[in-house]
Image (cartoon, grey):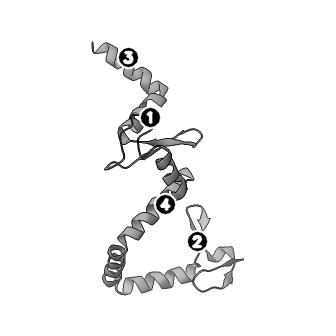
Amino acid sequence: MNKCNRCKKFKDAKEFSIFRGKLNSTCKDCRVKNNLWYKEDTESKRSKARERYYKNRDKVSSYRFEYRLMRKYSLTKASWDKMLEDQHNKCAICGVEFISLKPCVDHDHKTGKVRALLCRNCNLRLYAIEDESFLLKAQKYLKSMK
């Protein structure tokens, strides 16, 4: 038995649709009602959502950034700030300051382990170096062009 977040009733799992491999948090009946409600005046609902977004743009941006850090790298905002502080707000490879640049999180693609914060140039170059097959092909290409 699962509880619908909308009507708060406990219902059988068959009453919930599956989305991305998981049961939805609202039952099928509540989803149908919600879809009908939304279709009544779609444009005004969209404009209200837009207004809320623009009014809270900084909060939304901050939330999205923190959510992505946690989901993709298992990093909190505090650990991100500590990494920046430990690196003196500079790229771990070339030492360029992150004044107008946004740092990239360098991580091992096989293990997912976070290593450091890099500038975009260093991060892209490092990715090419890590991919041994690409590196060999690139070296072969450069030799053939001499």
Q: Give, as a three-letter code, the residue at label 3.
A: Lys
- Give the percent coordinates (x, y) of residue 144: 31, 14
Quarter of the image for the N terminus: give it. Answer: bottom right
Q: Mark 2 points at which residue?
A: 24
Q: How far apart, in angstroms, are the residues tagged by discs 2 and 1?
A: 37 Å
Residue type marked 1: Tyr
Rendered location of residue 107, percent (x, y): 52, 41
User: Is 20 in front, or is 84?
Assistant: 84
Given this view, does label 2 or label 3 mark the residue nearer the observer?
3
Q: Identify which amino acid the numbered label 4 is placed on.
A: Glu
Mark 4 vs mark 1: in front: 4
What residue is disc 3 on? 140
N-terminal-most mark, 2 or 4? 2
Q: Which of marks 2 and 4 is in front?
A: 4
The circle on residue 66 is: 4
Instruction: Name the residue tied to disc 1.
Output: 127
Circle on res. 76: none
